[in-house]
Amino acid sequence: MTYIDQLKAYYERVTEECVSGLSLDCVIFGFHDTRLKVLLLKWKDTNEWSLPGGFIYKTESVDTAAGRVLRERTGLDQLFLQQFHLFGDAVRYDTDDTWQRLKMPMKYGVNWPDRTISMGYYALVDYTKVTPAVDFMSDECCWWDVADLPSLLYDHRHIIDVALKTLRLQLNWQPIGLNLMPEKFTIPELQRLYEAVLDRSLDARNFHKKITGLNILTRLDERRTGGAHKSPYLYQFDEVNYQKALINGSLNFV
Amino acid sequence: MTYIDQLKAYYERVTEECVSGLSLDCVIFGFHDTRLKVLLLKWKDTNEWSLPGGFIYKTESVDTAAGRVLRERTGLDQLFLQQFHLFGDAVRYDTDDTWQRLKMPMKYGVNWPDRTISMGYYALVDYTKVTPAVDFMSDECCWWDVADLPSLLYDHRHIIDVALKTLRLQLNWQPIGLNLMPEKFTIPELQRLYEAVLDRSLDARNFHKKITGLNILTRLDERRTGGAHKSPYLYQFDEVNYQKALINGSLNFV
DNA sequence: CGTCATTGTGTATAATTTACGGTTTCATTG
DNA sequence: CAATGAAACCGTAAATTATACACAATGACG
C-alpha cells in the first residue's frame, strides 16, 4: 500500500468516524538529564517537526481520545493529561506554506471542514518509561529540549508556549513532580525540574529544606554513587501525602 | 413568524454558517449583595433553566464567538472572559429527558451532528453594568446565587461547578476582584467576594491589613453612609498596580 | 444618652522565606 | 596515599508573612 493510499484511507476514515473540525494537539512533557523535554514528530520525507495529535471518534469522549493518541505515541497506558487551551483562531497558520513544508502528496478528501479547531492537552510522563513511536505519516518521534526546539509546523510553537505557561502556573496544585520524575531520584535532580518549570534558579539549601519539610518524599536506603562528589540520597514520592499536600495547599513554589 | 419558524430558521443558519458539533457555554459571574451570582436563561414556556451559550461562526475565532454571545446576553462590549474546560464526554446528558423538559416543538434540522462538544467560558462582569437580555428561545434572563441554583438542563450544573473551582484556583493570578467589583466598593464588600469565591470565612482584621498592604487599592475621600454602624471608606482598584501584583505573584489568597 | 455591632488600626506570636555558612564525602589528580 | 575541589546535606540568623486576637471610633436605633 503506497503512502498516498494510506493517506486516502486515513482521511476517509477520519471523515467518516471522527468528530468534524475538532482535533487534539498533545504536548508531552518528559524530564531527562536536568532538562524539560517535549516529544515531537518529524513528518515523512521532510525535516519538519510538529506535535503529536489526532481526532476524536464520534463515540468517545475528548479525554479518552487524548489518552488513546498519547498511548500510541508513548506506549503508556496510563499517564497524567490535562486540557489547557482551545486553539480556535479563525486563521491559525498559513495553510499554503504549511502544505508546502509538509510535502503532502494530496490534500484532504471530500467533506473535510474548512478549518480545524484544536484542543491542547499537556501530558506528563516518566521519560524512562516512554517508547516513542511514529505513525505512518512520520519518520521520527524524538524528545526535544523545550529551550532548544526546532522550527515547528502549524501554530505548534505557540501551543507549546501556552502549555509551558500553564505548567508553571499549575505547579502548586497539579502532581507535576510526581508524574515527571522517575521512580527514584535525588533532591538535586528534583530541584533541576522545578528550576526548568519555573525558569529560574533556586537556592539548593532552601529547596532541600523546603521539599523535605513537605513530607511528600520518602528517603531510600540507597545513594546515587559514581558521581565525582558526595553521593546524594535517593528518594521516592509518597503519593498519598503528595495528593494531600496538593489539596490542602501546602505546595508554595510559584 | 411563529416560534417554530424561528427555530427552523435558526437551525438552518447554524448548520449553514457555524462550526459543526462545537458550541460554547458561558458561566457569567457577577457579584451583588455579598453573593456570587451567575446569569441563567429560562427556556420559553418552561420552568427550565440553563447557561447562555451559542455556536461559532465559521469565520470567527472561538474567543470572538464567546465575546459575541456574552455581549448579546449582558449588553457589555468588553468583559473579562476565559476558557476553562472542554466538555466532551460521549454522552453528556440524557437527551430524551432533556427534550421533554425543553418542550421543544421540533428537533434539530438535517445535517445536525450526533453530538455537541462544548467549550466552557467563564466571564466576570460588574453586576451593576449588566442588562440581562433574553434570546428568542427564552422567557427570562436572571441572576442566580451560585449557592442556590435551580435545577439545570444539560450538564450545566457540572459546568458551573467546574467554573467555580477554576475561579477559586485562579484567584491569585487572574484579575477577579478587578472585574467583579463595582467601580467603588468597601473593603468589607471585597472581603465578602473573596469569601464567596474561596467558600470560607476570612478574618476581617487580617484581610483588611493584607489587602491594603498589597497597594492595589486607592482609598477615596468618600464613605458609604447610611449603614447602621461606622461608615466604611470607599475604595477603587489601582488597575496598573493590580496587574503588576498579578504578574509578580504578590497575591496570596488560595 | 446608652447600647450594639461594624469598621479600622493595632499588637503578639507562629510560621515561612530568604540569605548564607560549614561539614561531610566522593572521585580525581599528583 | 594525601590533597584538592565541589556537590550534597544540615544548619543558623534575619526578614517577612500569616494567624490570632484586642480595642477604640463611630453610626443608627430605642
Image (cartoon, coloured by chain):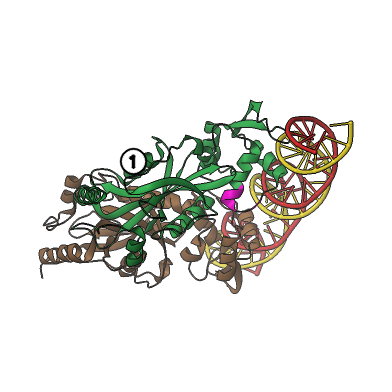
Chain colours: A brown, B green, C yellow, D red
Examine the rendered structure and indicate whether residue C25 appears above or below residue B5: below
B132 on left or right of A205? left
Residue, disc 1: B68
Examine the rendered structure and indicate whether residue A133 appears above or below residue D30: below
Find residue C19 and report its horizontal and vertical position in percent: 66, 44
Magenta stretch? B195-201
Q: Is residue A183 magenta?
A: no
Find residue B169 and report its horizontal and vertical position in percent: 53, 52
Farthest top residue in view: B221
| Amino acid residing under circle 1 | Arg
What quarter of the picture does the N terminus of chain A occupy?
bottom left
A224 on left or right of A52? right
Q: Report the residue at 68% width, 40% height from top.
A: B208
In the image shown, does A128 or A232 lie closer to the viewer? A128
A87 on left or right of A236? left
Find residue A7 and report its horizontal and vertical position in percent: 14, 63
